[in-house]
Image: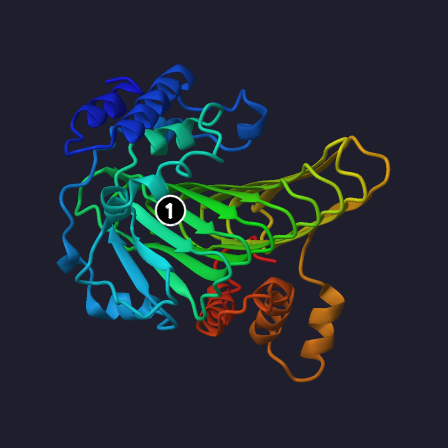
């Protein structure tokens, strides 16, 4: 069966009642996916990420949710307990595993399937309105299979305290499956919310998570969004995060990638209102034969907007990484202020990173900068620490932690920050695992 035909067959198995507007959106997206096919390395944006193996795998939609496959101990490791926690198994909402929490009047956090059934007039006008499925194969595929995921809504002037935590657990059960979770976050004018998305899997079987998150940030609103990806080594993880910002809004994105065999994250925001601000932070750790790719786009579409971006990567073994960060300043976006930095630490002679920071400036009254670095552990710093009685492994871990801490310390969610601190300290502890370790 061809690369696209399996997904067309999967589409024909989707049943249930569907609002007419959603069915039109799905059908349009499926037609676009069929026309585009899967991306190849001939495309500039996919030059360093080959998805041929993913495209040829006959993924099937997972069977009904089986919450019993997720142990209490596994779930407890992921919980933050700072607000409502919505748990999804293979992309479908698992109410028995989720934990409710009181939200301010009018604010909501629920499954997308429930929101589509109970309040389609609130969901459908926003769904698919800011993601570009016409030019993205995986976004089109996700849109064609919209069934469930999360819906977060913050009304005008409401500040949601704590954290809304969305936990996406992959449990293929020995089968080669694909899940298409969809998340829609809407913060109306002057609203404020923090949302954490966690993607995790423990299966040894190959599976794919193809996720899309849409974020609408109203005028003077503030959305903090943090994504932690910790899939199994057997997993393909492809994800799009797309935000649209109105005037004087603030969007903070933090993306942390720890797992997965092949990982691709596309993170984009459009500063569509004057005076808006965004911060994009990212940290990726890869070892063995992992491949992790981050493509980011910050679109300054209106004047007096500012953006800051810091992405850091640590690669060991034969891992490969890609960072492509683009900042676009349109002719109308005078007095834009943008700064972009990508720094990479290679711990072995076999690790590879391809980095490409980009500025596309079409206005003349702007302040923009960008840069990228690739380096090894500093021998002088390592010698300095060892001269003070610190063993080589401990000295190495201290330097790695110091490199990552710039991003980790910006995460405001205390339990998540503490977990990342622990992961960085323990992840690269064996310095002699291979002959080319540095």
Q: Is residue 167 above or below residue 41?
A: below
| Count of marks, rendered view | 1
Mark 1 neighbour class, 10 Å CA radius: few under 14, some 14 to 19, many 20 or more:
many
Name the residue at 28% across, 47% down. 115
Kind of element beneath mark 1: strand
Q: Position of residue 357 (x, y in %)?
A: 69, 40
Name the residue at 72% across, 63% down. 378
Name the colouring of the figure.
rainbow
Q: Position of residue 423 (x, y in %)?
A: 46, 67
- Taking the image as drawn, is residue 373 in sight? no
Residue picked out by circle 1: 183
Name the one closer to the observer, 387 or 132.
132
Report whether 370 appears left or right of 240: right
Name the residue at 49% across, 44% down. 292
Residue 354 position by quadrant: top right
Q: Position of residue 82 (x, y in %)?
A: 39, 72
- Which residue is outermost to the right? 365
Report whether 412 appears left or right of 311: left
Quarter of the image with the N terminus in it: top left
Name the residue at 14% across, 41% down. 63
Quarter of the image with the C terminus in it: bottom right
Q: Position of residue 296 (x, y in %)?
A: 59, 41
Report whether 68 appears left or right of 402: left
Name the one closer to the observer, 252 or 261.
252
Q: Is residue 188 above or below residue 178?
A: below
- Which residue is outermost to the top? 35
- Taking the image as drawn, is residue 361 in sight? yes
């Amino acid at each position: 069966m061809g690369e696209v035909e399996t997904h067309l067959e999967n589409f024909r198995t989707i049943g249930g009642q569907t609002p007419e507007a959603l069915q039109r959106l799905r059908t349009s997206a499926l037609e676009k996916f069929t026309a585009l096919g899967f991306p190849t390395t001939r495309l500039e944006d996919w030059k360093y990420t080959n998805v041929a193996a993913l495209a040829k795998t006959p993924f099937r939609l997972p069977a009904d949710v089986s919450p019993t496959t997720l142990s209490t101990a596994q779930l407890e490791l992921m919980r933050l307990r700072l607000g409502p926690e919505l748990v999804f198994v293979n992309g479908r909402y698992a109410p028995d595993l989720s934990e409710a929490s009181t939200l301010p009047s009018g604010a909501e956090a629920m499954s997308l399937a429930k929101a589509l059934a109970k309040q389609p007039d609130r969901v459908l006008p926003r769904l698919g309105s800011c993601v570009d499925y016409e030019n993205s194969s995986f976004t089109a595929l996700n849109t064609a299979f919209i069934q469930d995921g999360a819906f977060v809504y913050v009304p005008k002037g409401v500040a949601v305290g704590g954290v809304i935590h969305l936990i996406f657990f992959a449990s293929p059960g020995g089968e080669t499956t694909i899940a298409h979770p969809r998340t829609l976050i809407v913060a109306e004018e002057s609203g404020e919310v923090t949302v954490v998305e966690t993607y995790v899997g423990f299966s040894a079987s190959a599976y794919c998570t193809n996720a899309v998150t849409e974020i609408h940030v109203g005028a003077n609103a503030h959305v903090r969004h943090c994504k932690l990806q910790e899939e199994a080594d057997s997993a393909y993880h492809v994800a799009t995060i797309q935000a649209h910002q109105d005037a004087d809004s603030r969007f903070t994105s933090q993306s942390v990638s720890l797992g997965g065999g092949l990982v691709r994250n596309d993170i984009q925001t459009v500063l569509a209102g004057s005076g808006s601000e965004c911060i994009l932070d990212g940290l990726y750790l890869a070892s063995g034969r992992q491949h992790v790719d981050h493509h980011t786009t910050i679109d300054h579409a209106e004047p007096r907007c500012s953006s800051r971006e810091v992405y850091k990567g640590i690669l060991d073994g034969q891992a490969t990484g890609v960072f492509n960060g683009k900042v676009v300043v349109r002719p109308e976006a005078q007095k834009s202020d943008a700064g972009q930095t990508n720094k990479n630490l290679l711990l072995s002679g076999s690790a590879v990173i391809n980095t490409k920071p980009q500025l596309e400036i079409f206005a003349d009254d702007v302040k923009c900068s960008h840069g990228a670095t690739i380096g090894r552990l500093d021998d002088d710093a390592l010698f300095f620490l060892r001269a003070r009685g610190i063993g080589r492994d401990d000295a190495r871990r201290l330097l790695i932690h110091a490199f990552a801490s710039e991003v980790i310390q910006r995460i405001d969610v205390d339990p998540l920050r503490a977990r990342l601190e622990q992961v960085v300290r323990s992840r690269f502890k064996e310095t002699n695992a291979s002959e080319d370790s540095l």
